[in-house]
Amino acid sequence: MTKAPSTLATDAHTPALRIKGDTDSAYHLAYQDGFALLDIPIDAQRLKDMLDDERCGAFACFEGWVRNHNNAAAVERLTYYGYEALALNQGRAIMSEAKARFDITHAVAVHRIGELAIGDMAVWIGVVSAHRYPAFDACRWILDTIKADIPVWKQEYYADDSSQWLSNNG
């Protein structure tokens, strides 16, 4: 375990905490390609509005929030670091594969990077389809695949001032 900094230091990891473009561009990318990273709080309603489609009778959504514990340790906050260019490429491929695998109309996923507090939304996934089962199945598959394949790393900070790096599956 490493000592948690009192404030985020500027170092080699700092670029992995911020997206390169502006927020509107990130939301546009999410709509266009199905996936984006954000370095500010996720606007779930804005994302849900992107999926409005009269052909669809089902909407499945997942929101992942920062919780206050991991195993027996009290968690104070998290920092997510992301390799943006690779994340966007892999995210686009994941969303394309989801559309090929499942009978869905559209899907959007956004993952946060940067410092997050307890209760902050870290990931949002929404899927629409004509029927509920493809939407549910695709939503879970997208989440599991994002957590396995997107280059985002998590550093957890604990109440005892220590921190630990975890895989995004942790």
Image (tube, helix red, strand yellow):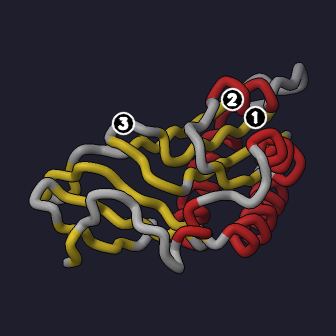
Q: Which element carries disc 3, helix, strand or loop?
A: loop
Q: Is residue 154 left or right of residue 113?
A: left
Vertical placement of 26 versus 52: above or below?
Answer: below
What is the C-alpha distance between the residues marked 1 and 3?
26 Å
Q: Nearer the viewer, mark 2 or mark 3?
A: 3
Res 119 label: 3
Q: Which element carries disc 2, helix, strand or loop?
A: strand
**Residue at image mark 1:** 128
Q: Is residue 102 left or right of residue 145?
A: right
**Residue at image mark 2:** 59
Which amino acid lies under the numbered mark 1 shown in the image of this protein? Val
In this orientation, does residue 104 appear? Answer: no
Along the line of sight, the residue nearer the viewer: 72 or 99? 72
Q: Nearer the viewer, mark 1 or mark 3?
A: 3
For marks 2 and 3 on the same chain, the one whose residue lies earlier in the sequence: 2
What is the C-alpha distance between the residues marked 1 and 2?
5 Å
